[in-house]
Amino acid sequence: MSFINDDFMLQGAAARELYHRHAEKMPIIDYHCHLSPQEIAENKQFADITELWLGGDHYKWRAMRANGVGEEYITGNKPSWEKFEKWAETVPYTMRNPLYHWTHLELKRVFGIDKLLKPETAREIFEECNAKLATEEFRGQALIKRFNVEVVCTTDDPADDLHWHKMIAAHPFGVKVLPAWRPDKAMAIENPKAYKAYLKKLGETVGKDIDSYQDLQEVLQRRHNYFESVGCKLSDHGMDTFYAADYKPVEIEIIFKKALLGKVPSPQEIEKFRSAFLFDQAVMDARSGWVQQFHVGPNRNNNSRMFAAAGPDTGFDAIDDKPVAAAGHKFFDRLDSAGALAKTVLYCLNPKDNEVMTAMAYTFNDGTFPGKMQFGSAWWFLDHEAGMRRQIETLSSLGLLSRFVGMLTDSRSFISYPRHEYFRRILCDMLGADIESGRLPASEMDFIGRMAEDISYNNAKNYFAF
């Protein structure tokens, strides 16, 4: 029997029925990813499997470094085959890391290759993948369509002109590609030089100088409206923790002007500014009826030597351990009290916050929409089997798993969609085990099957109103 077989990760008859009859057939809504809109619009043809698989994949890069592979084979200029060969040498050592499963799922689902990747098979797999990537059926758009993807939401800065999104809309290929608003740079006041340069770029998008915090909010509102006109329905914020300090509007103006003068604000001033900025952004989202997402908990760019050499997003981030409960509750209470609390999805990077985030979300559900406040999927360092199971267990224990909007890729890769399959198999295995152990009634198999379908697709479709 092949490793990636029909019943991979499905341990019982109930799990197999739930997956094969229900979850497997559902389309994919990838409501948060980091795919390049330009590469989608241009229907990118990848030079080879190394570019497709290893280009920008810091998950693989971290594993290769841990396996003793030199940086010249990772972010360096070694030939494509040599980089792939080093990855093939690493793969057997990734057993019990999700990379081992993802690697072989992608080989099977994308390329139809049922062999295990290891040094003995590396050259054969490299050549077979490359031959297929040279054909029209393996260009960027076809790779997305291969997985029955219905909607893709990219991650986009407010200063982006969304040219590529509009090009995709003008030349549809069967998958809706929408922008998602990510205003992190507009909040990054802690580095005045970079911040001032960003404000110049942002202001140029609407032909307005940004000389005050009020100007910033006016420009962001105009950009927000523009994003909405191109189909945006979601915002996203990447943060180390929540911010909800008390502040007065005049203080925020003073802090803003200080940064424009090139002076670094104090930690207290940064906290106040972030508190005001996040509140104003959330109000903007609520007015537009958007969903807001908060990805909370990364500690970024920790290896200063490698950050200087390779830049951000190259595998040197980690999990932070800042407190999130007090400020998070205060932040959402402010919004709720102001009648400006939008649909919200919370993601934590530190597993210590699973229960904290779930309880936080469910404190502010108000009966206006099923699952209005959500504890989101296992993310980044947690999107492995154990992390997905813990997220499902926590959500089941403290909330309504049945209203969960399900999985996303959070990926820069065109072939990460088997992560949705991975999640669905884990979900069905857990539900099936509960049926077979008597924790859930076997007589309700039809309802539980519909629940698996909802979590896989229907809930996201309704929640985001795609």
Image: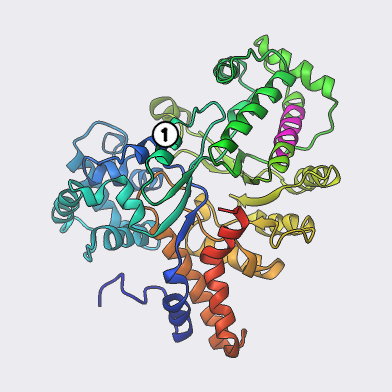
Q: Residue furthest top?
A: 261
Choose between 80 and 158: the one closer to the eye: 158
- The image shows residue 237, relative to residue 398, as above or below, that is above
Question: Residue at point 62% right, 57% down?
Answer: 463
Asked if residue 61 is among those painted magenta in the image, a careful observer would answer no
- The image shows residue 195, relative to residue 118, as above or below, that is above
Q: Residue furthest front?
A: 170
The kind of secondary structure element at disc 1 is helix
The quarter of the image holding the N terminus is bottom left
Choose between 221 and 327: the one closer to the eye: 221
Q: Position of residue 458 (x, y in %)?
A: 55, 64
Q: Quadrant of residue 54?
A: top left
Q: Position of residue 103 (x, y in %)?
A: 32, 57
- The image shows residue 276, relative to residue 372, as above or below, that is above
Mark 1 lies on residue? 164
- State whether residue 290 appears in this view: yes
> Is 329 on the left or on the right of 59, as rendered?
right
Q: Position of residue 47 (x, y in %)?
A: 21, 40
The secondary structure making up most of the magenta span is helix
Magenta region: 272-282
- State whether residue 36 appears in this view: no
Question: Residue at point 18% right, 48% down?
Answer: 135
Question: Residue at point 30% right, 51% down?
Answer: 142
Mark 1 crowd level (few <14, some 14–19, many ≥20, 10 Å Cα) = some
> Is 291 on the left or on the right of 214, as rendered?
left
